[in-house]
Image (cartoon, rainbow, N blue to C red):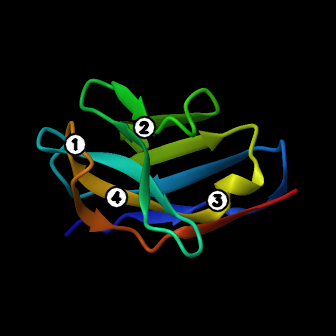
Amino acid sequence: QVQPVESGGGSVQAGGSLRLSCAASGYSRSAFCLGWFRRASGKEREPVARIGRAGDTMYADSVRGRFTISQDNAKNTLYLQMNSLGPEDTAIYYCALITCGTWSTLKWGQGTQVTVAS
């Protein structure tokens, strides 16, 4: 039973960077993929980035050019490199098992808090 586990959240000043990690194993990489989502206080959870079987990536417009998603299959770990952070990026970030090529989620991690101070 796959259970994504996020780490790497924290507090940072505006303009700074953070890298989130997600440990996820026990799932079929030929059938499923991984993605990042976030939920800001008082808002709905929204997709951030996802990565496909061939390493193809997709980003939300709000993070494209600032965030980079990557995956190390040997370490069973998904990453989200976040640069040029702003207060609008403050949220709980979730790693999720998804149906490849979609934002349809199958299993959520517990989330990790990212706070960006202005």
Q: In the depicted view, which residue is nearer to us: 23 or 98?
A: 98
Cβ–Cβ under 8 Å for marks 1 and 2: no
Disc 2: which residue: 71
Name the residue beneath numbered marker 4.
96
- Given contact means CB atoms under 8 Å apart, are the residues at marks 3 and 1 in contact? no
* Residue carrying label 1: 102
Disc on the earlier residue, 1 or 4: 4
Q: Secondary structure at mark 2?
A: strand
| Count of marks overlaid on the render | 4
Q: CA distance from mark 2 to mark 3?
A: 15 Å
What residue is at 37 percent from the left and 48 percent from the top? 35
Secondary structure category for the residue under label 4: strand
Q: Residues within 10 Å of mark 3 (few under 14, many from 20)?
A: some
Q: Which of the two labelled residues, at mark 1 and mark 2, occupies the earlier sequence position?
A: 2
Q: Position of residue 95 (x, y in %)?
A: 42, 58
The residue at which mark 3 appears reads as: 8
